[in-house]
Amino acid sequence: MKTYWGKNFTRRSVVKRGGLYVAAAGVAGITSQFSRFTPEARAEILAKARAYQDRPVTITAIQPVSPTATSDDYGIAFQEVYNRFMDANPTIGVEFAYSPWAEYTQSLSVAIGGGNAPDVATWIDDQRIPSLAANGFLRSVDDLAAADGMDLSEIDAVALSSNTYAGQVYGLPYYWDDRIFYHNTDHFAEAGITEPPTTWDEAVAMGEQLDIRDGDTYSRIGYIPLSPSVGPGAGGNSYLFLYGWQNGGSFVSDDLTTVTVNDPAIVEALAWCVEVSDKYGGAEEQANFIAQAARGSNPFLTGSVSMMTQPTGFGVGSVEGSESPVSWAVSASPYNTTPATWSGVLSAALPVGSEHPEESWELAKFMASPEIQTYFAETLAWIPTRRDLWDSIPNATTDPELIVGLAEFGNTNIRPPLPNSQQLWDEILRASDAALYHQASPQEALDNANEIIQAGLDEYLTTS
Amino acid sequence: MLNALLPQTNRGRETMMALFFASPWFIGMAVLVVGPFFMALYYSFTDYKIMGDTQWVGLKNYRRLIDDDRFIKSLKNTAYFTVLSIPLSLVASLGVALLVNKPFRGSTLARTTIYLPSLFGGVFVAALASQVFSGNYGLANRLLRYVHIQGPQWLASPEWSKPTFVILGLWGIGAGMVLFLAALQSVPVHLLEAAIIDGANSLQRFWNVTLPLLSPAILFQTILLLIASFQVFTLTYVLTSGGPADSTLFTVYYIYELSFQRFDMGYASAASWVLLFFTFVVTALVLIIGSRYVHYEFDGDS
């Protein structure tokens, strides 16, 4: 096994890490109903923000969170970060610009293309960075880092690789997570199960023990690995990427030029997901189950699904923040041939056309600084991309999610940072849906996806 | 000085004033519609991706469309929606208009109630639909269970998602009802009285007198619905993102995907122009065929 960048990752695993997923993780995974800020603390942060006026330079920072939404811990935390930045930089003001996540890429690209770029995008996930960089929306920060003498190797190499396109760095990662396996401990106790599953076969077998059926209808499902892409699914925040890696598959060649989403190991993984889905009546019946069991929301939260893959923080945030929290515990994700999990990365990046690149760079750098990553860890339980800070995370040795999550980073993957990373994501989901709905076999669906993604990639390769 | 520039006749001054007051529309039309219209035509022959150099690629984007299975599928989905939704909407809005045409106690309230939903936007309809058509536990399937029918999975089913959209299209029949009400009110009473004298029953009067006189309104409404159905977007955007399994991938949503998720603006522009072409052709066909059957009471030759 060849090591890469001196970290505990193979070269293959590093290049596999890519693009996005905070689309899913950033919004679904880390969005919480559980407020870590008292109303007084919120009011104080907002009042302080209003007091910063008449700075010589004001930069606009855009993110899909809002400081004034009372349910949004992330928005108020970001406002506090900007307050601290303005304290440290008396000549720079930061204006908070909001765009909903669903329209974030659109807002950003249109603003940049229209010559009205925000100065800094402080919330871009690893799927979007390569695509935005390849299409000329982001500027490389290599020159700014070099001029500043910033040592980018202080940031985890894998997290940084998700921000790297064509050998250049386009963003500074300040947050990442990985996916771990949640189970309902009450359900386990009822069924007499004492240990969580470690393999796919165990997960499916335990799932069957945990199922509850009323006639033809399930009122509780033990485990479903993969759900259709539209709507909340019983499969949680997983997607085919996770299972492909857990079956030893690779989605793209090491040199990022050949798409291999129809790798036999990935086809086999999808076939397994379909097989389990069919056992529960198929994709349509699952949708019905979600509507019934969870009223359209996450069925793990309502105790309707016993086991589910989610990013770290799901337990303390979403489960504990729900009205009647279920009892839960975590473990490493079960796998088939290869222990593997999957990380999402959030970064601060500079759009092309930023009127104040130097000041914006200061903010991006500030967000990735030890001070702010520690603040995020303390207030939001976010995992720093600076590994040297991990020891300072509150409860790092006692919080079960963090214990499992941090240990699992040794097996983590990120989506390949392809220039057509959005297309890669879309086609993987489409192929999964086609197989789950039996519109195509897993092989046909992934062959088709492979052809489309490769054609998209070739366009970039031939023009670069 | 200014007076010297103005026309000296009253008619000329009126024309100038009319143009002056209409000028915001002309400016808006030029800047927001005509300009982008021709820019999109130009971009359809380029590899425009918002940023970077734009190269002329000739017909490449149009050739790509021919081989693009998803584009073809989006056209088929759009055609499916159009073919089903237009007749259904026409019949429903005309039927409702006939019901509330004659004054009765509460007829104004009934008309208002039926018209009201069409004032709400697509996002509102989508939010409502997500509850009504939510599997077995949405309102639709609950009601069906009362009559011992096991309803489908609606939006979660590739087979039923498009028909669900067609049903949702009925939400806006109030606007069509108003149009048909106006047309019904203008049907000359003497023609209906003459038919009664001739012994025509109510169905014969409707078929031979009312319906021919409604034909201009039917054609007009058909054209409106046709254009709207080719542009269906909001429901997909809010409810399904084109899924499940591309079953609600309509062409405008696909164009949106190409534009703002892939930044492939040149290609998206070509797709837009192909959609426009189909819209134009189908509209022209409907006008040509429809004009054979449309009866204008005072045109002297119908």
Image: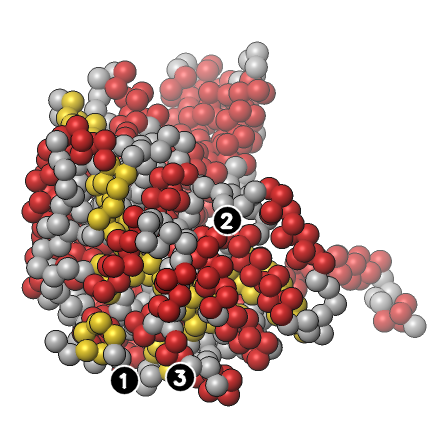
Could you tell me which residue is drawn at 31 percent across and 20 percent down? B143
Which one is closest to the eye, mark 2 or mark 3?
2
Mark drawn on residue A73: 2
Residue A286 falls left or right of residue A276: right
Graded by Cα atoms within 10 Å as few (under 14), some (14 to 19) or many (20 or more), the crowding at tag 3 reads: few
Q: Position of residue A234 (x, y in %)?
A: 24, 41
- Residue A51: name its quadrant: bottom right
Q: Using the image, name the chain to which the residue with label 1 belongs.
A: A
Using the numbered discs, state the Cα–Cα distance from disc 2 to disc 3 in whole angstroms: 45 Å
Q: Amino acid at mark 1?
A: Thr
Mark drawn on residue A462: 1
Q: Position of residue B210 (x, y in %)?
A: 46, 27
Using the numbered discs, state the Cα–Cα distance from disc 3 to disc 1 in whole angstroms: 14 Å
Which one is closest to the eye, mark 3 or mark 1?
1
Inspect this view and state whether residue B39 appears: no
Q: Position of residue A102 (x, y in %)?
A: 43, 54
Mark drawn on residue B55: 3
Could you tell me which residue is drawn at 22 percent across and 48 percent down? A331
